[in-house]
Amino acid sequence: MAKVKCSYCNKEISKKPSQIAKSKHNRFYCNTKCKSLDMKQLKREEVEKRIGQDLEEYLMQKYVVEKKPTTWIMEDAKIHSHYIVNCFKDFGIVARNESERFQNWWDSTGQERKKEYIKEISIRAKKNLTTEQSRNKLRVTMGSKEYREKISKANTGIDNGMYDSTLSKSHRTKTRALFGYKKWAIKVKERDNFTCQKCLKKGNTKSLHAHHINDYYEYEKGRLDLDNAITLCSSCHSIFHNRNKGISASKELLDKFMQE
């Protein structure tokens, strides 16, 4: 047996000549704890040599002060995410929660990557919704009282895509009670065979809306004109107006929406 010193604590230990010969880096340890601590120290020295500064200072500056996402740090320092997490624990750095991480990533991401991400999420969502299990779960959720109240609140007042801040409350009340409006809406839906002209979903008078092609308030003469209307389901109708908040409805906007 040959006498060697532990590469971490310098304690004298005995090793077989064959073990010494097989050692790639000529480093020996008295126990697994010393080996783990030494490997951690070597890794830190390797990273600090690459970034040119103290690792703790680097993480504090990039993650806490500059609010760089971990994906950016991984690429810049050439380190893995699990190593960053372990360093946070060692240095007492509080990691961001999920919403903070996403917001931080979103703010630091270019427009092209954002478009790619939205496309990826859309494809994933459509794929998930095609499964019977997901559809049943969605039906249960949308049928709950809590969901209906939440959606109602989210589409009320200034949060509604059709809200116009220039109109008075009395004006809104008066126009909603326009004589012949309900019959006009039913005729529009009957003409379109009670089918949403965007997603082709069939429905009833409650689930379908008669959408004005040209703006209801600006095109006053066309409020009860059948040629100035198209049937949309409540979902497609909300999407159209939420995408075009503050913009008067027009045939050009509708054509663009229908082609998407």
Image (cartoon, helix red, strand yellow):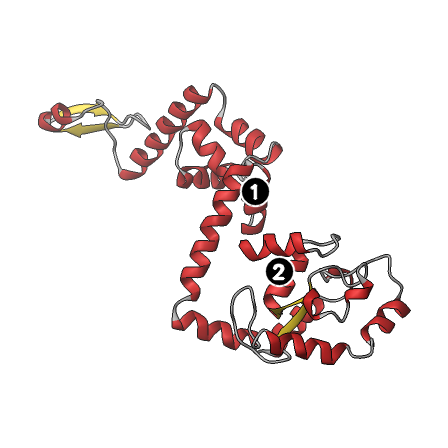
Marked residue nearer the N-terminal end (1 or 2): 1
Label 1: element kind: helix
Q: In the rendered view, does 170 fall on the left or right side of 61?
A: right
Name the residue tied to disc 1.
Answer: 106
Q: In the rendered view, does 199 fall on the left or right side of 162?
A: left
Name the residue tied to disc 2.
Answer: 239
Quadrant of the drawing holding the N terminus: top left
Q: What residue is shown at x 48% (from left), y 54% (from top)? A: 122
Q: Is residue 146 visible?
A: no
Q: Percent position (x, y) of residue 230?
A: 64, 67
Label 2: element kind: helix
Q: Based on the displayed image, in which of its 4 quarters is residue 213 positioned? A: bottom right
Q: Percent position (x, y) of residue 243?
A: 65, 54
Kind of residue at disc 1: Trp
Q: In the rendered view, does 231 fall on the left or right side of 43?
A: right
Q: Is residue 16 above or below residue 196?
A: above
Residue sitting farthest toward the left = 18
Q: Is residue 5 above or below residue 247?
A: above
Q: Nearer the viewer, residue 148 or 181?
A: 181
Q: Percent position (x, y) of residue 255?
A: 60, 55
Q: What residue is shown at x 43% (from left), y 56% (from top)? A: 124
Q: What residue is shown at x 49% (from left), y 21% (from top)? A: 53
Kind of residue at disc 2: Ile
Q: Based on the displayed image, in which of its 4 quarters is residue 106 positioned? A: top right
Q: What residue is shown at x 31% (from left), y 38% (from top)? A: 33
Q: Nearer the viewer, residue 32 or 229?
A: 229
Q: Residues within 10 Å of mark 1 (few under 14, many from 20)?
A: some
Q: Percent position (x, y) of residue 5?
A: 25, 24
Q: Residues within 10 Å of mark 2 (few under 14, many from 20)?
A: few
